[in-house]
């Protein structure tokens, strides 16, 4: 089997594993999202470096939740130059606490943090600060990876050890998943694909729960359809107190 086929087959099996093992965790996260929304709370998402791509997937997205507020921060994106600065910044003590304090989060809100290794200081500080603020915290991480590394946080804890809910992306140690003859290292990460599938499945379940509760689902349609702008503006108007990124 060639490497391309091997990778696709691995992704299929991994997504099946996520569905089989993480259904309850995703369900719990969906209930947390809906409960927060119904009580007038806000939803937030955060990830640093490539983990931040899942935050981008969650907000202002066609077919996605309109009420997820992203937490972006200087130095934590692959767009920073030199890019190695992002690795240093995510290890910076107290930065995550500052970001949480300035995010607009308050008691009763819910925060999803994506960190594949779950070991870096910025994610831990943000989670701990959020919990102190009375915010429900959800970790999206790789338990296999995280359990095999030491924490970089002064507490010695990893993200899955401090959050209220944990969703495992079922990835491997180091994230890169494929070994090929003639090369000693593994290639082809899985966390972005599995992470995106998880948060979109979470959004689908939130939609179902909104319908069951008889509330208007706060979802967006494509701005490139003829009705997109008008439809989305109605959602923005109806949920304006819970949407921070458009103000």
Image (tube, rainbow, N blue to C red):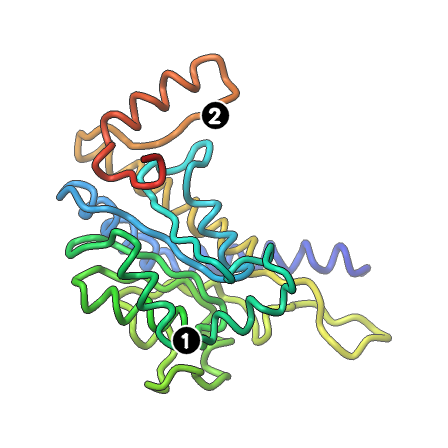
Q: Residue at x 26, y 25 (%)?
A: 237
Q: Residue furthest top?
A: 226
Quarter of the image that includes the N terminus: bottom right
Query: Residue beneath label 2, please?
Result: 222
Query: Does residue 180 appear left or right of residue 36 in this picture?
Result: right
Query: Does residue 70 appear left or right of residue 80 in this picture?
Result: left
Q: Residue at x 30, y 41 (%)?
A: 244
Q: Position of residue 12 (x, y in %)?
A: 60, 54
Q: Residue furthest right?
A: 182
Q: Position of residue 33 (x, y in %)?
A: 26, 48
Mark drawn on residue 89: none
Describe the element under mark 2 as helix, strand or loop. Answer: loop
- Rounded to the nearest angstrom, the CA distance separating label 1 from label 2 is 36 Å
Which of 5/241 is in front? 241
Quadrant position of residue 156: bottom left
Mark drawn on residue 121: 1
Quadrant position of residue 176: bottom right
Q: Residue furthest left?
A: 39
């Amino acid at each position: 089997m060639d490497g391309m086929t091997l990778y696709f087959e691995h992704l299929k099996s991994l997504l099946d594993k996520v569905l089989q093992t993480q259904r309850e965790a995703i369900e719990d996260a969906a209930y947390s999202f809906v409960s927060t929304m119904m009580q007038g709370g806000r939803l937030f998402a955060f990830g640093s470096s490539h983990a931040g791509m899942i935050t981008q997937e969650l907000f202002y997205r066609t077919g996605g939740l309109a009420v997820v507020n992203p937490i972006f921060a200087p130095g934590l994106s692959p767009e920073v130059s030199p890019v190695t600065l992002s690795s240093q910044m995510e290890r910076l003590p107290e930065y995550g606490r500052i970001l949480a304090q300035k995010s607009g989060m308050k008691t009763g809100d819910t925060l999803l943090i994506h960190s594949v290794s779950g070991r870096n200081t910025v994610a831990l500080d943000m989670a701990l600060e959020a919990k102190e603020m009375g915010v429900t915290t959800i970790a999206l991480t790789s338990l296999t990876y995280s359990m095999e590394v030491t924490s970089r946080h002064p507490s010695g804890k990893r993200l899955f050890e401090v959050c209220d809910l944990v969703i495992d992306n079922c990835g491997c140690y180091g994230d890169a998943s494929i070994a090929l003859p003639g090369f000693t290292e593994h290639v082809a990460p899985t966390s972005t694909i599995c992470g995106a599938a998880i948060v979109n499945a979470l959004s689908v379940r939130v939609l179902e729960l909104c319908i069951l509760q008889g509330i208007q689902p706060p979802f967006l349609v494509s701005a490139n359809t003829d009705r997109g702008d008008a439809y989305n503006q109605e959602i923005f108007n109806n949920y304006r107190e819970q949407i921070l990124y458009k103000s």
